[in-house]
Amino acid sequence: MADAGPGPDMTTWPTGRLLSMASRLVEHTWIERLAEAGLTHAGLIALDLLQPGPASQRDLATRARVQEQTMSRTLERLERDGLVSRAQDPADRRRTLVASTPAGTTAWAAARTLETEVFPRSADPDAFRAELLAVIHALSAERWPG
């Protein structure tokens, strides 16, 4: 196998290209580690949204900013794996409430600690998160008003 050389000089790349590269690397690593824990990225989002308590599928989809069908598939897998349960809403029989099971809460908590193992340390993690949030808020305002 030929030596690939020193690699590209990324210091000259535009910020957008750097963000794109970082995003892809983080996403691939994150998905691999979640899979090792028996979760998907979508499953982790659903479990995270369920931590305050049970919610309807429609509410979960709205809060996750996905279609109800997409959330339905995610919840089906989580239910099959014993990480969520579904029950009829006692206040409205037409509505089904989804809740995290004890196994789901344990999986969620374990996945939350993956961040410290997966992502490189930042000199100022709070400032880094603030910058990421600023980018997300600025670019998502037109896509998802409110």
Image (spheres, rainbow, N blue to C red):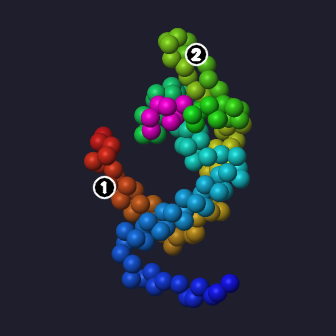
| Element type where label 1 sits in the image | helix
Residue 45 appears left or right of 36: left
Image height of 115 relative to 120, above or below: above
Seen from the viewer's position, the closer of residues 102 and 75 is: 75
Q: CA distance from mark 2 to mark 1?
A: 39 Å
Identify the image quadrant of residue 5.
Answer: bottom right
Q: Does residue 35 appear in the picture of this structure?
A: yes
Question: What are the residue bounds of the magenta stretch?
Answer: 66-72
Q: Main secondary structure of the magenta part?
A: helix
**Residue where numbered disc 2 is placed:** 88
Image height of 103 relative to 12, above or below: above
Q: How many residues crowd around disc 1 within 10 Å: few (fewer than 14), some, or many (20 or more)?
A: few
Residue under the image location 51 percent in, 63 percent down: 24
- Whether residue 15 appears in magenta in the rendering, the answer is no
Name the quadrant of the N terminus.
Answer: bottom right
Identify the image quadrant of residue 52.
Answer: top right
Image height of 118 relative to 107, above or below: below
